[in-house]
Amino acid sequence: MSDLLIAVCTLGKVRAEWATNLAIMKPVSGRPYELTLLQGMTTVDARNVAMALAKERESEYLLFYDDDMIPRDSDAVLNLVSAMERYRDIDVLGGIYPRRRSVPDPLVFKEEEGGVWWGWEDGQIHEVYMTGTGFMMLRMERMNNDVAVEVYPLQDSMIPRFFDRTKDRTDDFYFADLCKENGIRQFVHGHVICDQMNIDGTRYAIPERVAV
C-alpha cells in the first residue's frame, strides 16, 4: 500500500535531463510513495493500467509523471500534494505545460470551446474544463467510487477505461469530458509549470510574459 503512486508512462527511453530532474525532485515527507514505470504499451493503456494499480494498492493519490515532463521547480510534486491535502474538494489537479508546437501555448482550457487560457499566470489554483494529463494528480477515492467507466481486456486482465483517444480527441479531452459527465471538477496549479522534451532533445517551454 502506498499513499501516493507515481506512474511514469514511458516508451522505455528517457532523456538524461528528465532523469536528473526526477532525481532532484523533493520527496514527499511523512507519506509513503511508490514509483512505477509503465512501458511497452500505448500512453492510453498505460494510464488505464495506472488507475487499476492505484485502486489495487489502495493509493490515496495517483500522479502521472510522463517521461517527457520537466518540472521547472523541484517542489512541483510537493505543491500538488499540499494543495490536495489542504483543499479536499479538489479531486483532479494538473500542472501546466506547453503543446508541442512552434507556438508552445499552455495546454489549459477554462471553457470547453473557449480556447487556450492564461489566467493561471497569477500562480493560483483555478478550476478549468481541461488540463494536460502528463503531469496530473488524482484523488483516487473519487475516481474509484464516483466515476462510472467500462472495462476492456488488456494483457489478460480487464482494465477500467478512464482514458481513451479518438481521431479528433486526445486522452486529455476524453478524461476532461469523463470528469464533467461524472461531476468531477478539474483544477490547475498556476505555480506548477513544466517544459516538454522530446527524446531527440527538442524542448518546448511556455514563454515568459512580455510587457506590451
Image (spheres, rainbow, N blue to C red):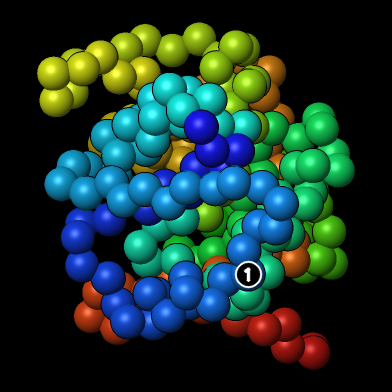
Q: Residue at x 38, y 74 (%)?
A: 19
Q: Nearer the viewer, residue 205 or 36?
A: 36
Query: Does residue 185 appear left or right of residue 153 in this picture?
Result: right
Left or right, residue 52 beside residue 86: left
Residue 157: x and y in percent read: 21, 17
- List x then y, in percent, for residue 28: 66, 57
User: Is residue 65 in view?
Assistant: yes
Q: Residue at x 30, y 77 (%)?
A: 15
Q: Residues within 10 Å of mark 1 (few under 14, many from 20)?
A: few
Can you say whether 116 is above or below 25 in the image?
A: above
| Residue shown at the point (62%, 32%) measured from the top left | 60
Picture coordinates of residue 149, whole percent (x, y): 44, 12
* 180, above or below 129, in the image: above
Please identify the quadrant where the C terminus is shown. Answer: bottom right
Amino acid under disc 1 = Lys
For this rendering, which residue is in front, 4 or 67?
Answer: 4
Disc 1, SS: loop
Measured as percent of width and height from the top left, residue 75 is found at: 68, 69
| Farthest bottom residue in view | 211
Identify the image quadrant of residue 187: top right
At 39% from the left and 25% from the top, the residue drawn is 52
Figure disc tally: 1
Q: Label 1: which residue?
A: 26
**Residue 138 seen in the current view:** no
Horizontal side, residue 87 vs residue 37: left or right: right
